Image (tube, rainbow, N blue to C red):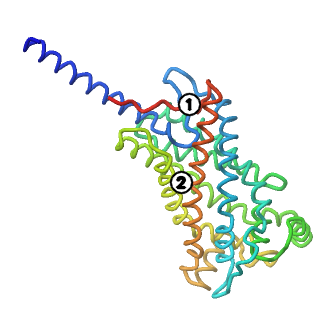
Amino acid sequence: MEPGNAKTSSLVKKQKCYTDALERKRCITHTGSHMSFASITVKDDKPVDFLGAFVEGLIAGGIAGVVADAALYPLDTIKTRLQAAHGGGKIMLKGLYSGLGGNLAGSLPASALFVGVYEPVKQKLLKSLPENLSSFAQLTAGAVGGAISSLVRVPTEKLSTFQVVKQRMQTGQFTSATNVVRVIVAKEGFKGLYVGYGSFLLRDLPFDAVQFCIYEQLLTRYKLAAQRDLKDPEIAVIGAFAGAITGALTTPLDVIKTRLMVQGSGNQYKGIFDCARTISREEGVHALLKGIGPRVLWIGIGGSIFFGVLEKTKQMIAQRCPGSTMKSAPFKQD
């Protein structure tokens, strides 16, 4: 080959590598959540398929939520008993699965609805907002998904009821869900089934928004740094890390929610802020961090299981449905 042609060929190759690198970076930046849970591949000139994403999200989110909650329910029970104990009260280690049925009856539709709402909202915002506001899009989508999923959490469907039932059973006050509902309604009225609903939203809305934003941002940056598609164990570790951080940050809100839900008809606390003040005054500020160990462990491992199962479910849906909104484009190599 002549020297001139060799030089030209070299320049062409360098230009191609540079172009491919820019394309790969653009692909990762705009669709970095391809490997995140229930991610949706949406072309720039194609609108978001809200219905398809919603239905597929219901399936994937429901399966992942049930598997994660069932696997880690004992840790949740220990955490609840630690938070409900006053002073140096001891906790019992029997019946760690008490109330599981009621919890799953609430977590299944809640997890399914959250995923179904989160993804299309996130994708719509990512398409509408500037690239540097991706975290805002994820935070907003998480809050919207959490708010809408809470609508299935009131009596017969809403989780506030199931949470009260579950936690009353976890702390040993009752032995069956039917007995819980009957006694609560008799002594406290139907409003007793909604105890702590405000604090439940106070804890879960920021939790949902922050956890999934952290997860998406870490996933995008890790994938950009690795220059390849991520493996299942890597996704699981990222999910665990995001869950653990968020779990630690929201522990005080979780303690307040637990105390309000298990206080019964005595109304020891007048509300969220009164509960926080009373706990701090009578037991010390450190009491607001009760159960942080089991909570961080529970949510960290739960995040690993949840995202791992969700990714597998997403892949199965994509394989069975050619037009699935969950199809992910493979990472481009040079």
Inspect this view and state whether residue 148 appears. no
Quadrant (top left/top right/bottom left/bottom right) for the N terminus: top left
Residue 98 left/right relative to 227 = right
Quadrant of the rendered image containing residue 323? top right
Q: Is residue 257 above or below residue 237?
A: below
Who's the residue at 48% across and 44% down the image? Answer: 136
Residue 16 left/right relative to 89 = left
Q: From this viewpoint, which residue is outermost toward the front?
A: 1
Q: Is residue 148 above or below residue 131?
A: below
- Going by the numbered disc 1, the residue's amino acid type is Lys
Q: Which residue is mark 1?
A: 327
Inspect this view and state whether residue 75 appears. yes
- Residue 231: x and y, percent? 46, 44
Q: Nearer the viewer, residue 268 or 109?
A: 109
- Residue 301: x and y, percent? 56, 60
N-term mark: 2 or 1: 2
Residue 175 left/right relative to 81 = right
Who's the residue at 66% across and 49% down the image? Answer: 147
Q: Which residue is mark 2?
A: 211
Quadrant (top left/top right/bottom left/bottom right) for the C terminus: top left
The residues tagged by marks 2 and 1 sit, at their Cα atoms, a distance apart of 23 Å
